[in-house]
Image (tube, helix red, strand yellow):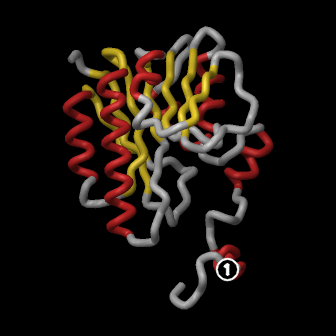
Amino acid sequence: MEGVDPLSPMSRSRSPYKKPDHFTRMAKTAGFPARSVYKLEEIDRRVRLLRLGMSVLDLGAAPGSWTLYAAERVGAAGRVLAVDRSPITIGLPAHVAFLQGDALVLSDDLARFAPYHVVLSDMAPSTTGNKPTDQARSFELFMRGLEVAASLVVEGGSFVGKIFMSEDLPLARAELRKMFGRERLIRPLGTRSVSAELFVVGLERKAR
């Protein structure tokens, strides 16, 4: 609201992101650090994304909900590499590795664990409140995550990337379709109504 300091208690109390909701409470009860786990759970259920024994790369992993979910789904015979500039402070299973740093400049480290059956990107920009700027930054992160997937995902593999709805969405989808045989747009039920985010899913990575 104009005239209200976004850092003030009044602003915080009005923010829908600050108030625990049904998904937040469920995540806490289930032992996940964030409600975002239910977004990935729905995507997984709808496209049969994760299976036992898979190798998964999780970009923008903190605070770790997607990482824990992926680790459960691939089991001890699989492996998960989680990457984020922020630390993950929760305990992680033995078949999960964590790299702290910019996922987009750690190419050698990411390649060392490759190839991957699935690349997940829940990366999102620090929002400025300027809609065009935030949309442009989200598009850039999506495209850079897609580049990582293009080089490190096995033939037949998958990519899930977060993006803000904008006029750049058709371009993002077109670039993904060049690399993947099937594409899905998913806006999970766990997404807050005020959020502009959705997920573009690429399935069946084409032969290079």
Quarter of the view holding residue 208: top left
Category of crowding for the residue at label 1, using alpha-carbon neighbours closer than 10 angstroms: few (below 14), some (14–19), many (at least 20): few
Dot 1: what SS?
A: loop
Expressed as whole percent of the image width and height from the top left, the position of residue 18 reads: 68, 65
Q: Report the side of 39 relative to 146 (left or right).
A: right
User: As rendered, which of 44 and 1 lies closer to the eye?
Assistant: 1
Establish if 27 lies above or below 164: above
Residue at 28% across, 52% down: 169
Residue on which the image places disc 1: 8
Residue at 71% across, 27% down: 92
Establish if 184 lies above or below 119: below
Expressed as whole percent of the image width and height from the top left, the position of residue 137 reads: 36, 56
Residue at 57% across, 50% down: 190
Amino acid type at image mark 1: Ser
Count the marks: how many?
A: 1
Residue at 56% across, 38% down: 61
User: As rendered, which of 150 and 113 lies closer to the eye?
Assistant: 113
Expressed as whole percent of the image width and height from the top left, the position of residue 43 reads: 49, 37
Extreme residue toward the right, this view: 29
Quarter of the view holding residue 65: top right
Quarter of the view holding residue 19: bottom right
Q: Is residue 3 visible?
A: yes
Expressed as whole percent of the image width and height from the top left, the position of residue 73 reads: 60, 22
Extreme residue toward the bottom, this view: 3
Establish if 5 lies above or below 64: below
Q: Is residue 40 visible?
A: no
User: As rendered, which of 2 and 28 lies closer to the eye?
Assistant: 2
Q: Quarter of the image containing the N terminus?
A: bottom right
Extreme residue toward the top, this view: 77
